[in-house]
Amino acid sequence: MPGGGLHAIVLAAGAGSRLQPAASVKPLAEVAGRPLILHALDSLAAAGADSATVVTGFAAPDVEAALLAAPVPVRVRHNPDWATTPNGVSLLAACADVMGPTLLMMADHLVSPALIHRLVAEAPPDAGLVLAVDRRLGHPLVDEADVTRVRTMSGRLLAIGKRLLSYDCYDTGVFIVTERLIRALEGLSSPGLSDGVARLAGEGDAAVVDIGNAFWIDVDDPAALRAARGLWPR
């Protein structure tokens, strides 16, 4: 981590097929005249990140060109298997950049710097990963059918998945991760990020931070993009 600050990883490898009717390259979908990938980096920088890694896949040259306007120095890692593997494999493409606690978020999420600030300030120092969670169940900006659901108890993450029937919060897609998550993913075959999180949760090594009223939205389809354009910045 240059300068002793926080390093961040942003996953930007997927094709974003659900958003393609409105934007051909999801990380480059514009909100308030700026692509989503740069909004992600802006929020991370405002919350204290002083360097970042972006994992590319689909339309990698176009995404890399946009990174010339990034607010912090950016290293690019490429997942050549982006079309056939889940997002845990994209994180493994950047495994060399996880050296101590590292911020992690998705390129298609609009997240307020306040959310990331709160995660950093309240994260317990002993956890293998810490996930920022939203306890506002039924929030109108959340796609209940697609959001990743989380069950917690006393600040610990117990279970995670899109099909959980018993849950008390949503996964916002913003984490602090450590080498322990990388080791968990490496022990799985073609893992999704949630698979690694679930493994650490089973070992009692995953914690959560409640984001309170902080703003976030997963820009995953045209309706979400319209909502984001109507609400950002705020």
Image (tube, rainbow, N blue to C red):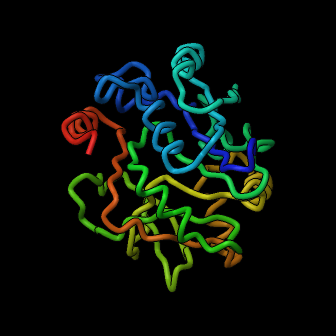
Q: Residue at x 23, y 37 (%)?
A: 223
Q: Position of residue 144 (x, y in %)?
A: 30, 57
Q: Quadrant of residue 167?
A: bottom left
Depicted 146 relative to depicted 170: above or below: above
Q: Quadrant of residue 201?
A: bottom right
Q: Residue at x 76, y 57 (%)?
A: 100
Q: Position of residue 18 (x, y in %)?
A: 36, 32
Depicted 178 relative to depicted 200: above or below: above
Q: Quadrant of residue 139?
A: bottom left
Q: Position of residue 84 (x, y in %)?
A: 62, 32
Depicted 52 relative to depicted 59: above or below: below
Q: Residue at x 65, y 46 (%)?
A: 88
* Left or right placement of residue 50 versus residue 220 in this view: right
Quadrant for the N terminus in the image: top right
Looking at this view, is 34 or 144 the one in front?
34
Depicted 132 relative to depicted 59: above or below: below
Name the outermost residue toward the front: 3
Name the outermost residue toward the bottom: 154
Q: Residue at x 59, y 28 (%)?
A: 83
Looking at this view, is 2 or 87 the one in front?
2
How many discs appear? 0
* Left or right placement of residue 149 versus residue 197 in this view: left
Q: Position of residue 218 (x, y in %)?
A: 37, 45
